[in-house]
Amino acid sequence: MRNKHLLIAAFLQLPVATYAAPSTSYTGTISYNSDNNLGLGSYGRDIVSDDSIDLSASMSHTMNLNKQNRLILSATANVETYSKFDGLNNNGIDVKLGYQFQFANQFRSPLYELYLLTGLSDYKSNFRDNTHTQYGFNISLRFDDRTLLRAGFSNESIDADSIDFMGSVYETFDAKRDSYYLGINITQTSKLSLYATVSMINGNITANWTSQTFDDYIAAGFANIRPAWQTVPDAIFGNGWESTKYTADITKLTLGFNYAFSSSNAIDTVFESLDADSGAYSYSIERFSLSYLHRF
């Protein structure tokens, strides 16, 4: 559930100020990512970490309908490679259509966006191959010439290809999630921007654990901790591991800064902290990402 902060940031910086001819931009990104709990483990023996490199290319086409309304069609393709757990290596493509509008063409007029995103991801681990859709609503409001407030909602659905070598169908990696967020962007200088976001998420997560952990849960009396139709043997982190789906409440804090070297080059640094609780199961994650962006 990697954060799409770069796409969100692009929306935040584009007020509908004037009518202009259609425009198209292209961006290439290379990111280093670190995750200290890839499998969403709760116990120490179930917690694994890894680093990855992500290469992506995106296109965005803007069509201004008038001074206060526009359509944006964007597409992003990516390839992500992990250093240790190569079963998580993946590539994918997302296509997003957004409608942005204001009710008044003024500095402090809120900017609204309705969007629909669809895409597919192909993993080396076939269980995780999926198609996904997301729709949502964003709003941003300029507090002053340095501060931007933002909020939004999204609904995400993931339809995974979870079929094992015996032909059994699982729902382990299928997911539905609702997310709400509040955030702030602060422009320090013409080149440096800071941002922070708090997100509340409810929906499905897939946790990985060893068979020993499952035995411990059974011994503790949690007989329903592993629904058969939501659990699949999964050796992506080693022999004797399983993946199980739960419904959880997740709180996520995102802190970042963006530094623009020029109008075409920037770096983006992000720290994320997540805490999830499903009643019988809980976990925490810390993630770090460093990205270099080049606009062609």
Image: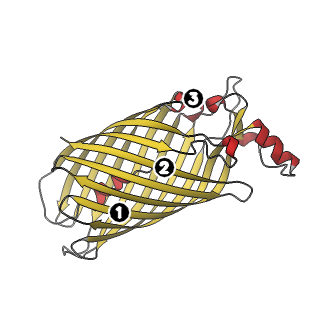
C-alpha span from label 1 to label 3: 36 Å
Q: In which quadrant of the rendered view does residue 256 lie?
A: bottom left
Residue 126 circle label: 3
The scheme the figure's colours follow is secondary structure
Which residue is at 64% across, 57% downward? Answer: 248
Which structural element holds mark 1? strand
Residue 84 percent across, percent down from the top left: 53, 30
In the depicted structure, whether residue 126 falls above or below residue 31: above
Residue occupying the point 61% across, 49% down: 205
**In terms of sequence position, does the residue under pointer 2 or pointer 3 come before the other?**
3
Label 2 is placed on what type of residue? Arg
Q: Which residue is mark 1?
A: 195
Q: Which residue is mark 2?
A: 287
- Is residue 181 something one can see in this rendering? yes
The quarter in which the C terminus is drawn is: top left
Asked whether residue 163 appears in the rendered view, the answer is no
- Residue 236 vs 49, above or below: the answer is above
Judge the density around disc 1: few (<14), some (14-19), many (≥20) Cα neighbours within 10 Å. some
* Total count of labels: 3
**Is there a contact, CB below 8 Å, between mark 1 and mark 3?**
no
In the rendered structure, which amino acid carries the disc numbered 1?
Tyr
Q: Position of residue 128 (x, y in %)?
A: 56, 35
Q: State the image coordinates of residue 111 (x, y, percent, origin top left).
A: 29, 68
Dot 3 falls on a residue whose secondary structure is: helix
Q: Determine which quarter of the picture holds residue 226.
A: top right
